[in-house]
Image (spheres, rainbow, N blue to C red):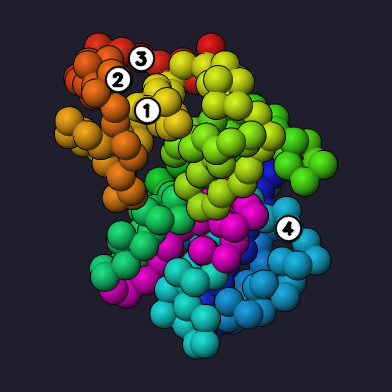
């Protein structure tokens, strides 16, 4: 397989080292790669605006005016596919990596073996067949991965769909959206549909998601939601998205 990889690090020595390790990995796995190196987040974004076909980003966190976390958040506003691997000398940003769906968080100095494992995971993610649904957004047909949807909220004549890193509205009822999404989602309230895999805890009146958001839970739906929550996280239920 062929992969386009970017290395973004303000240290020339680290740029060279990570590029070398990436080529070792490609040779070992019989892949071909194209590696581009950038000394700042701003430099990467300038080139990314012209060519957005990067598969993997090896990203330092501590850089000049824009740090790696800020860059990752900006990328995630429009790109869920690119595989981000954080590489840093400090372990203080692991929670930030979760926010941008980072593949891994590697502490410098990075070994050949640890980077290879992270690149293997990134390559695997790129080739997963992710179930998706197509919505009309601003008169365009947009493909949305079901695994990116946290919850759906109904309004008068539309629904707001909240993804991992953004929101959008569709002109459909919540019942229509529920039929489109299929299993893997459950009604917690007449106006809310929640991704089961993102449920962290439930009380009598609300569901708390992994990102800390709280979704209303009606008395009518409590028993069904509680049962699914327990069965899913006990491993008794294996939901198939979109079926």
Mark number displayed over residue 179:
none
Residue at x 32% of width, y 74% of height:
89
Q: Secondary structure at mark 1?
A: strand
Q: Nearer the viewer, residue 151 or 72?
A: 151
Nearest to viewer (mark 4 / mark 1): 1
Picture quadrant where residue 87 is located: bottom left
For label 2, the residue is 221
Horizontal relation, residue 72 to residue 54: left or right: left
Number of dots carrying numbers: 4
Q: In front: mark 3 or mark 4?
A: 3
Q: Please rate how many residues cluster around mark 3, counting C-alpha atoms within 10 Å: few if below 14, some from 14 to 19, many from 20.
A: few
Relative to 169, does residue 199 appear above or below in the rendering? above
Report, in whole angstroms, how far the alpha carbon at label 4 lies from the one at label 1.
39 Å
Residue drawn at (78%, 61%) of the image: 51
Q: Name the spot of residue 34 as percent of width and height, x first.
A: 69, 57
Q: Indicate left or right for 190 with 8 as reference.
A: left
Which residue in the protein does label 3 denote? 238
- CA separation in Å, label 3 and label 4: 35 Å
In the image, taking residue 35 as reference, residue 62 lies left or right, namely left
Per the image, the residue denoted by label 1 is 189
Q: Which residue is mark 4?
A: 52
Highlighted range, magenta: 73-90
- In the rendered structure, which disc, 4 or 2, sits on the residue that comes first in sequence? 4
Q: Nearer the viewer, residue 230 or 123?
A: 230
- Examine the structure image and report whether residue 15 is included in the region drawn in magenta: no
Measuring 40% from the left and 46% from the top, which residue is drawn there? 117
- Give the percent coordinates (x, y) of residue 122: 50, 45
Residue farthest along the bottom direction in this orientation: 64
Q: Is tag 3's residue or tag 2's residue first in the polypeptide sequence?
A: 2
């Amino acid at each position: 397989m062929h992969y386009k990889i970017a290395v973004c690090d303000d240290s020339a020595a680290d740029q060279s080292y990570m590029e070398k390790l990436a080529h070792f990995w490609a040779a070992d796995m019989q892949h071909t790669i194209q590696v581009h190196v950038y000394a700042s987040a701003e430099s990467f974004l300038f080139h990314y605006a012209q060519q957005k076909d990067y598969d993997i980003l090896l990203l330092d966190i501590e850089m000049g005016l824009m740090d790696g976390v800020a860059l990752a958040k900006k990328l995630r506003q429009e790109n869920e596919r690119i595989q981000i691997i954080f590489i840093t000398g400090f372990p203080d940003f692991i929670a930030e990596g979760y926010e941008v769906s980072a593949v891994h968080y590697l502490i410098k100095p990075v070994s050949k073996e640890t980077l290879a494992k992270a690149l293997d995971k990134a390559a695997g993610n790129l080739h997963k067949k992710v179930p998706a649904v197509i919505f009309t957004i601003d008169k365009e047909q947009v493909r949305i991965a079901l695994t990116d949807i946290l919850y759906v909220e109904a309004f008068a004549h539309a629904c707001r769909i909240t993804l991992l890193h953004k929101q959008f509205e569709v002109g459909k009822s919540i019942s229509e959206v529920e039929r489109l999404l299929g299993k893997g989602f459950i009604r917690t309230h007449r106006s809310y549909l929640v991704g089961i895999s993102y449920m962290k805890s439930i009380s009598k009146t609300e569901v708390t998601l992994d990102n800390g958001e709280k979704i209303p839970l009606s008395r009518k739906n409590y028993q069904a939601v509680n049962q699914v929550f327990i069965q899913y996280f006990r491993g008794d239920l294996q939901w198939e998205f979109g079926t």
